Image (cartoon, grey):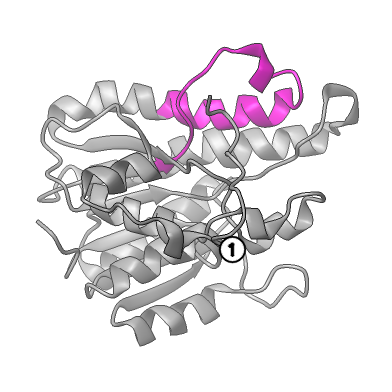
Amino acid sequence: MSSLAGKTLFITGASRGIGLAIALRAARDGANIAIVAKSSVPNPKLPGTIHSAAADIEAAGGKALPIKCDIREEDEVKAAVAATVEAFGGIDILVNNASAIWLAGALDTPMKRFDLMQQVNARGSFLCAQVCLPHLLKAENPHILTLAPPPSLDTKWWAAHTGYTLAKMGMSFVTLGLAGEFGRQGVAVNALWPRTIIATDALNMIPGVPLERCRKPAIVADAAHAVLTRSAKGFAGQFLIDEEVLREAGVSDFAPYAMDASQSLLPDLFLD
């Protein structure tokens, strides 16, 4: 399978950034996209809403269903999944992209921020999977793809921002557990992580990261497409890196993905 035509994707955090890029790549195939995010009205600090994303997806050739949803709220997730199934007849793919970030040490991490990260990242990914799985188990080629890094217990990734690392590794371990439980039932449960830092609007809120040394979200979107068009059977528990996925798919020139091809790239967190 090389196309997502007619497939239904439930993508969290799809109003901007990597989530929107994955949605747009699927839309070019003619996929159905449930845009699941909190952003329903414009934010001067973070451009993009579920409605602007829907317009972009429709323009790209897909069908869009904008859904305002806080994935911390069980009832909202259940309602979002029900609306998706009603609109498109089922769910083929869950993309756990929504994530909260706070890059600070223990003494500089308010518990409100700590709780937000755990609730959105690990708990939110688990909840979305739990609610989508009854529909995924009925799908022809079901996938769960989570934007999470390879699990690591190296203290260099924990010391600087324990709260964030715990939240992201929580997504990784949710992936591992669900892969073990549902991979044998034919659901491809895997994680994807970028080799380099990706230039998104949210990155502008983190001081000191030069965007010219980052890659565009399109590289993650293309890698996700390569993953999601694979046969789900026997494909679970993998912690994939975008560049490696694309190299395996035959891509050798990564310059078009760079914000500035003349600059050296910044490696992403959690990768040696």
Q: Is residue 145 left or right of residue 43?
A: left
Label 1 CA crowd tier, 10 Å (few <14, some 14–19, many 20+): some
Q: Is residue 268 visible?
A: yes
Q: Residue furthest front?
A: 262
- Say which of 145 and 124 sits in front: 145
Measured from the top left, where is residue 55 in percent x and y? Answer: 45, 84
Q: Amino acid at mark 1?
A: Asp
Q: Is residue 82 left or right of residue 257?
A: left
Q: In what quadrant of the picture does the N terminus appear?
A: bottom left
Instruction: Count up the numbered dots.
Output: 1
- Say which of 122 and 149 sits in front: 149
Q: Quarter-wise, where is residue 112 in the image?
A: top right
Measured from the top left, where is residue 265 in percent x and y? Answer: 58, 47
Q: Within the magenta stretch, is there residue 132?
A: no
Measured from the top left, where is residue 66 in percent x and y? Answer: 46, 73
Where does the magenta region start and end? 146-174
In this picture, is 96 found above or below 185?
below
Q: Is residue 111 left or right of residue 220?
A: right
Residue named by callout 1:
260
Measured from the top left, where is residue 109 in percent x and y? Answer: 84, 31
| Residue ID at (62%, 43%) | 266
Q: Is residue 144 left or right of residue 196?
A: left
Numbered disc 1: secondary structure: loop
| Residue ID at (38%, 30%) | 175
- Say which of 65 and 3 sits in front: 3
Q: Within the magenta stretch, is there residue 166?
A: yes
In this picture, is 254 found above or below 160?
below
| Residue ID at (76%, 37%) | 103
Q: Is residue 217 visible?
A: no
In this picture, is 12 found above or below 115?
below
